[in-house]
Amino acid sequence: MNPQNLKSTLSSGLMSFPVTDFDDELNFRPHTYAQRLEWLAPYGASALFAAGGTGEFFSLEPKEYCDIIRVAVDTCKNRVPIIAGAGGPTRTAIGFAQEAERLGAAGILLLPHYLTEAGQAGLIAHVSAVCKAISIGVVVYNRNVCRLTADSLEELADSCPNLIGFKDGMGEIEPMVLIRRRLGDRVAYLGGLPTAEIYAAAYKALGVPVYSSAVFNFIPRTAIQFYEAVRDGDQQTVDRLTDDFFIPYLSIRNRCPGYAVSIVKAGARLVGYDAGPVRPPLSDLHENEIEELDALISSLGPQ
């Protein structure tokens, strides 16, 4: 899939971040990871982000990363394109990106470089170096210490033809409007805030019609139903699912930093696709919270 084809794919449809499976000793568990991807593939996600934020990229060793991308690409071949997470310092991010390309990923989600702040010139140099090190498409994740302005993104789009996507995890309206108006259709725009469903209608109004869903990991039928309701303007369904599921879900998720990942793994376990525990520094949900989540999932009916 060339970068422009990937851009077209990312411009419509629901995407998701599969969680990464670990055993009780926190080692990667490939067979259950493949089983989850097999289960999710027929539900119709337009792309899956392997080893992304919900996939605990920040905790992975290089060899594990290669194993995860390999399993994802092999399992979903000819069905769902795999976009691999890559991040960290520039040379590290380049190494991950080149490995993902070698393993057959359709594109890269360039995650923030972590910790240190940087000016726009430094961010441009970082993103540009990764783009120019590979030939597959790159989606830059605008979040935390990587916050690109419209000027910076336009400069990158001019010099890096394989920069085909902008995923926003900030939720700041003015910068998003400026970027959307300046860049037009030069890149695909994705909503990337945690529990993106809460922001989906507002982002659609800004010209960002698609997003990646973490809850697709354990309630794929409902995740697709919600996406289609937002897409089609079915406000009754959006309101019902927001009130009955997503707002109570947020009340659990917001109790502890890092629960945006932990609650997804808990959901996967509850529906029979156990992904194991999260790795430190994240922590798993408490039993009473798992019971609350179970009641919410059960109220949705079969997936």
Image: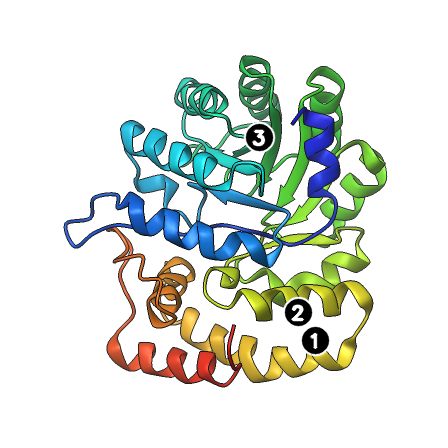
Residue denoted by label 1: 238
Circle 3 crowding by C-alpha within 10 Å: few under 14, some 14–19, many from 20: many
Q: Which secondary structure lies at badge 3? A: loop
Q: Disc 2 residue type?
A: Phe
How far across and how far down the image is residue 278, in percent? Answer: 28, 55
Q: How many marks?
A: 3
Work out whether 241 lies above or below 154.
below
Q: Is residue 144 visible in this depiction of the protein? A: no
Q: Is residue 118 visible?
A: yes
Q: Which residue is mark 3?
A: 106
User: At label 1, which amino acid type do we have?
Assistant: Val
For numbered disc 1, what is the local secondary structure? helix
Pick the front one: 284 or 281: 284
The residue shown at (40%, 78%) is: 293
3D distance between C-alphas at marks 1 and 2: 6 Å
Q: Is residue 282 above or below residue 83?
A: below
Cα separation between marks 3 and 2: 26 Å
What SS does tag 2 mark? helix
Q: How is the image coloured?
A: rainbow
* Residue at image location 39% in from the left, 70% down from the top: 271
Between discs 1 and 2, the one toward the N terminus: 2
Q: Are marks 1 and 2 in contact (CB under 8 Å)?
A: yes
Reading the image, the residue beneath label 2 is 226
